[in-house]
Image: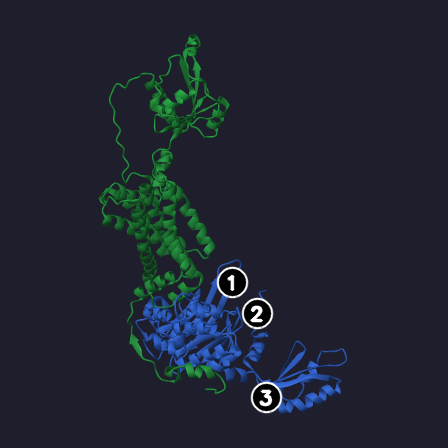
Amino acid sequence: MNSHTPAIACHQLVKSYPGRPPTLAVRGIDLVVERGECFGMLGPNGAGKTTTIEILEGLLEPTSGDVEVLGLKWKSDQRRLREQIGVSLQETRLSEKLTVRETICLFRSFYAKGLDPWAALDLVGLREKAAARVGQVSGGERQRLAVATAIVGWPELVFLDEPTTGLDPQSRRQIWDIVEAFKSQGRTVVLTTHYMDEAERLCDRLAIVDSGKIIATGTPTDLIHSLGGAHMVEVSGNRAEDFSLPIDLLSRLPSVKSVSVRDGVASLLTASPHIVLPPLVAALEQEGYRLTRLTTRQASLDDVFVQLSGRHLNEPVVVA
Amino acid sequence: MNTSKNNSLETSLQPAARGLAPVVSASVQHPFRELVWGRVLEFCREPEAVFWVYGFPVLMVLALGIAFRSEPVEELTVDVVSHECAAEYGLILSASPSLEAGVFDLETAMNRLRSGRCDLAVVISMDPDSSNDSVARDNQPVDHAAINVSEIDASAIAFAPRSTDQFEFRFDPTSPQSVLARDRANDLLQRAAGRRDLVPTTDRLQQEPGSRYIDFLIPGLLGLSLMGGGLWGVGFVTVEMRIRKLLKRFLATPMSKSQFLLSIMVSRMLFMVPEVLLLVFFARIVFGVRVFGSPLALAFLILFGSVMFSGIGLLIASRAKTLEAVSGILNLIMMPMWIGSGVFFSRERYPDAMQPFLRALPLTPLVDALRGVMLEGQTLLGTWQELVILAAWGLVSFGLALRFFRWS
């Protein structure tokens, strides 16, 4: 195995499920993940993230396209690859009757080389829970155990599918720490998420996925800068019974790159909020509007997604 | 790291998480051993499963053993229809330990016959040509109320049937008890009237362990346990793991697939050892059931049957995606074997045309072979035909299961 090859390279991945009409879950995805980076696939539920990651994990056959993981192919090097990657599926119910330690020992035994089970438990902060049954620990602890089973073989590359979905904020941060600790050892992480804060915090690079396609790739900062401004000014107000804002007027304001309106709130993308704000307030007052809200914030990955797809990340995909 | 977050984890994360490389070592535990051990632990921590596997067969043996305990054929009941000498004839009939006679009027006797409370009714009438003789008798007419004739000392009364009396037997020809009662009653009356046996006959009672119903039943229940354990134990557990996506999770590791499938079968066999020992010892201690053949041959058969049914269980579970689906199929498959493989009664009761079909059911050859070894002391060689059928079932189903097994 050549350690200069990328961790993952895939070309024109397509996956369709039979049916009438056939469902195209993945429609032509190209990806390169470098070694040692944390690569994230960000997208709403149903975007095809899980299908893509399961193809990369060798659990699903692509309908067409090429996949190389750590310079190896699934067809010819399945066994070697399995030794070198770790996987945490979106939802796996580990045996509830086994203890945390027994579960780790079981998964450890599958790998020829790996961590001592205790070291793996230390890594995820579960040493105190070693003797507890899986069925009796909290959701966050169970998810940390799932991550531990993925890294107990001390793999080159670990796949985490929605590692923090459904967890409380505290548990999510604990998972993030584990991922960062793993990455700090020079290992590669590929994860999927529909949380933009998770993507921004953990990922060196991101692919934004929608409807089975990658619609943008880059570092979180690059993606946000690609909007043309790093700030959002959000404003809402009304004139008597009229709640609609004068979009034309707003978009003509100095330094405003774009305006989008949603639920009565206009979002103005700008590089310099201090230039936008005075004329904005003056213009609306002149038109007889009463302001009900005026905030500025940093532009986020969600804004990138809105810009690209017209929807928010947390909006479910509407099947036409 | 951000200092405001993860205060709790900061203390619980060990050095590895803070930048020190953890030690990577070669494997120490064998995955097969871990897989089997994991299954054993899970099983032992599931009280319900332990009850069904160990408690149920014993309860069944106990219940059936009590219901069908070996007792001499129960007494046959004969009603003598009221007649002036009914009591005397009743005494003649009661002389046999297997008959119990009572005197009833015709209507009551017929009712009792219809409802199965008596097995035979004897109606005595007088030969019209010799009606005078009866007057000579000094016996008192018998009261209509039921008389328990057995309470009268039989030897104290010497009474011979009169040739002028005619006997009519009323009985149900489809009931073995009725037919038996008729023949006994006829015999007793004829002998009392002076018939002599022409050839000497002797009875020798055969009642030793090995020929009773419980002896027939135990090998059948053993087979039934092996079937239930193999099919449910393997089929249900496997589908459950598929639903939990655990199979898919395992597939994502370097775990060997065949070792995994084998571990399910082997762990099933481990649960079965105490189950079978329990059944055999229980039957031995409570009912005195003996194993006539070699214990080794019996052990081999048990293992063989267990592997075969595990294979079938795996095949049934190879595609099923819900517990409902797999339960349905399991019940459908087990039902014909419960009633057709000769577990509770001999399959010879079914018409000849059905026998080849019954013999082909996987449980039938197992039960036949178990009975051969346990009751007739056969060797494995003597049961080769059964072993061939079992092996065919095992190989075909395991092969198909491996081919069609769905991991997700």
Give the colour chain A carries in the figure.
blue
In green, which chain? Answer: B
Give residue A312's quadrant in the image.
bottom right
Q: Mark 2 points at which residue?
A: A316
Left/right placement of residue B118 relative to residue A242 reads left
- Dot 1 falls on a residue whose secondary structure is strand
Give the image location of residue B133, x and y in percent.
Answer: 41, 10
Q: Nearer the viewer, residue A138 or A51?
A: A138
| Local crowd size for mark 1, using a 10 Å CA cut-off: few (<14), some (14–19), many (≥20) | few
The numbered mark, 1 or 2, whose residue comes first in the sequence reads 1
Q: Which amino acid type corresponds to the residue marked 1 in the rendered image?
A: Thr
**Relative to A98, residue A246 above or below:** below
User: Is tag 3's residue or tag 2's residue first in the polypeptide sequence?
Assistant: 3
| Other-residue count near label 3 (Cα within 10 Å), few / some / many at <14 / 14–19 / ≥20 | many
Q: Residue A271 carries which label?
A: 3
Q: Would you name the residue on which mark 1 appears?
A: A23
Most foreground residue, B156 or B176: B156
